[in-house]
C-alpha cells in the first residue's frame, strides 16, 4: 500500500492575535482583572473615583472667575445654580494672581523678575542640553550678577565688582596651581577672593559709580514674595548645594583625618537639626554675632542656610553613588597614572553622579518645596505667607480651597518638570545593553 505525504508549498497568511491577547483588552485583563482580588479592588477603586468626581464636578462647573469678593461669588453661584449650590470662587486667583507670583514687588517693575525668569532658561540651557551652543556658557557665568541686578536693582557696578572676586579666585588658582598643587592653590584662590570682597569691593564700586553708573530702582528684600521668592531661593540653593555636596562627599571618603573629621561633623550636624531651626538661626541669632550696624540681607541668610542644609543631604546621596562603583574603576584610574582630581573628574564622579541622578533630583524637589518654610522667619512664601495675606482681606475672608489648589498646581508643574528632566537624563546616559 502506497502512502502519500502532503507538503505545503505556500505559507499561511499571518493571522491577527485574538482580541483578548492584544491592545487595551490584554492590558486590562493583565493589570486590572487578572484575578478575583484584583477585580474586586479595581471595581472598588472605580467606585471611589466616581464618588470623588461626582462631588467635585459641580463645584468646578459652577466656578466664578469674575467677582470682587467672596460674597459676590456666592451670590453669582446662587443665581446661576440655585440656593444651596456650591462652586469654586476662582475670582480670588483672577484678582490676586500677581501677589502669588511677585509678592509685594512694585507692579511697575514686574518686567524685571519676568525678564530674569526668561533669561534663567537661556542660562541653564547649555548646562542641561547638549544641542544648545556651548558659547552660551559665557552667559551662564554672568547670569547670577545680571539676575541680582534685575531683582534687587541699585547700581550695576555692585554685582559686576562682586563677580570680579571670582575672576581673582580663578587667576590666583591658575598662577599657584603649577607651584603648590591643586588643593593649596584652590585655598589660596578662595582667600584672595574673600580679601577682595572684604576690602576692595566697596571702594571699587564707589570709584566706578563716580565715573559712569547705570541704576535700577532698588527693591527691598521684604517686598519679595510668592513664587518669585521660592524660585530665587530654590534655584540659588540648588545651583550651589550640588558642588558643595560633591566636595563634602569626597571629604568624607578622604584619607586625610582632619578633612574627613570636618566633613563628617558638618554632615551629621546639619542632618541632625531641623531646617526650621536653621532658619530661625539665620533670622534671629546670626545678627548677634555680626559687628554693630551690619546689614546682612535676610534672603541671603536664608539662601546660605538652605544651601548648606541641602548640601549635607546631597553629600550622602553622592557618597552612595561613590560606594556603588566597583573597586576596579579606582584601580583603572591608578593604572592610567591619573592624579586624584583628574581621576575623580574623568572616571569616578561621572559614573557616581549618573547612579545618583534619581536621588539628587528627589533632593532638589524636596528643597524647592521646603522654601515654603521661610514663612516662619517673616518672608512671604506662596503657600502660607501670600495666601494668609489674601485671606486676611475682608473681601476674601473665608475662602479656603481655591488658593491652595492654585499654589499646589504651580508647585506640581515645577516639580513635575524637574522629575521629567531627571527621566530624560537617565535615559540619555543609559549605557547598559539590556
Image (cartoon, helix red, strand yellow):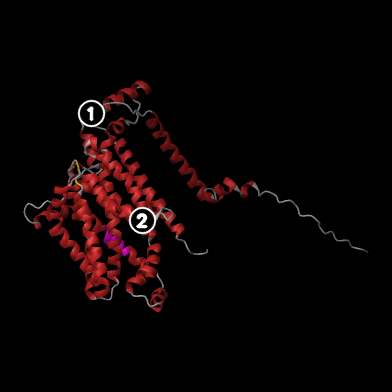
The magenta stretch spans which residues?
Answer: 310-316
Residue 178 lies, in percent from the top left, at 27, 73
Residue drawn at x 25%, y 47% as measured from the top left: 372
Q: Nearer the viewer, residue 222 or 125?
A: 125
Outermost residue toward the top in this view:
79
Mark drawn on residue 395: 1
| Secondary structure found at label 2 | helix
Other residues around mark 2 within 10 Å, as few (<14) / some (14–19) / many (≥20): many
Residue drawn at x 11%, y 54% as measured from the top left: 287
Q: Inspect this view and state whether residue 264 appears.
A: no
Other residues around mark 1 within 10 Å, as few (<14) / some (14–19) / many (≥20): some
Q: Inspect this view and state whether residue 54 appears.
A: yes
Q: Nearer the viewer, residue 35 or 261?
A: 261
Task: Please state, as top left, top right, bottom left or bottom right, where the N terminus lies in the image.
Answer: bottom right
Residue 108 lies, in percent from the top left, at 23, 35
312 is within the stretch colored magenta: yes
44 is within the stretch colored magenta: no
Q: Which residue is mark 2?
A: 361
Residue drawn at x 29%, y 45% as measured from the top left: 116
Amino acid at each position: 500500500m502506497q502512502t502519500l505525504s502532503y507538503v505545503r508549498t505556500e505559507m499561511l497568511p499571518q493571522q491577527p492575535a485574538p482580541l483578548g491577547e492584544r491592545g487595551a483588552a490584554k492590558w486590562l485583563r493583565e493589570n486590572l482583572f487578572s484575578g478575583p482580588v484584583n477585580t474586586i479592588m479595581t471595581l472598588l477603586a472605580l467606585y471611589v473615583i466616581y464618588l470623588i468626581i461626582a462631588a467635585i464636578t459641580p463645584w468646578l462647573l459652577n466656578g466664578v472667575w469674575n467677582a470682587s469678593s467672596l460674597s459676590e461669588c456666592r451670590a453669582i453661584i446662587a443665581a446661576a445654580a440655585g440656593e444651596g449650590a456650591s462652586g469654586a470662587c476662582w475670582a480670588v486667583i483672577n484678582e490676586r494672581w500677581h501677589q502669588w507670583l511677585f509678592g509685594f514687588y512694585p507692579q511697575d517693575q514686574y518686567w524685571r523678575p519676568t525678564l530674569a525668569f526668561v533669561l534663567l532658561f537661556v542660562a541653564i540651557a547649555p548646562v542641561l542640553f547638549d544641542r544648545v551652543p556651548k558659547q552660551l556658557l559665557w552667559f551662564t557665568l554672568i547670569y547670577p550678577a545680571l539676575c541680582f541686578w534685575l531683582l534687587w536693582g541699585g547700581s550695576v557696578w555692585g554685582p559686576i565688582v562682586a563677580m570680579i572676586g571670582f575672576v581673582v579666585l580663578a587667576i590666583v588658582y591658575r598662577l599657584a596651581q603649577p607651584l603648590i598643587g591643586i588643593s593649596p592653590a584652590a585655598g589660596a584662590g578662595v582667600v584672595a577672593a574673600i580679601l577682595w570682597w572684604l576690602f576692595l569691593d566697596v571702594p571699587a564700586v564707589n570709584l566706578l559709580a563716580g565715573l559712569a553708573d547705570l541704576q535700577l530702582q532698588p527693591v527691598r528684600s521684604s517686598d519679595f514674595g510668592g513664587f518669585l521668592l521660592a524660585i530665587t531661593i530654590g534655584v540659588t540653593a540648588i545651583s550651589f548645594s550640588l558642588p558643595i555636596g560633591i566636595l563634602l562627599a569626597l571629604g568624607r571618603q578622604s584619607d586625610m583625618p582632619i578633612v574627613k573629621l570636618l566633613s563628617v561633623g558638618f554632615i551629621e550636624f546639619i542632618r541632625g537639626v531641623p531646617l526650621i531651626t536653621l532658619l530661625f538661626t539665620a533670622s534671629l541669632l546670626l545678627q548677634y554675632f555680626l559687628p554693630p550696624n551690619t546689614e546682612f540681607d535676610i534672603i541671603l541668610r536664608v539662601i546660605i542656610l538652605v544651601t548648606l542644609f541641602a548640601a549635607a543631604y546631597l553629600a550622602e546621596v553622592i557618597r552612595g553613588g561613590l560606594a556603588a562603583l566597583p573597586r576596579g574603576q579606582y584601580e583603572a584610574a591608578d593604572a592610567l597614572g591619573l592624579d586624584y582630581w583628574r581621576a575623580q573628574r574623568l572616571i569616578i564622579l561621572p559614573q557616581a553622579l549618573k547612579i545618583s541622578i534619581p536621588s539628587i533630583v528627589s533632593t532638589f524637589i524636596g528643597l524647592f518645596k521646603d522654601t515654603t518654610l521661610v514663612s516662619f522667619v517673616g518672608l512671604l512664601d506662596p503657600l502660607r505667607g501670600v495666601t494668609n495675606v489674601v485671606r486676611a482681606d475682608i473681601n476674601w475672608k473665608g475662602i479656603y480651597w481655591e488658593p491652595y489648589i492654585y499654589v499646589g498646581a504651580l508647585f506640581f508643574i515645577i516639580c513635575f518638570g524637574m522629575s521629567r528632566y531627571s527621566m530624560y537624563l537617565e535615559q540619555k546616559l543609559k549605557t547598559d545593553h539590556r
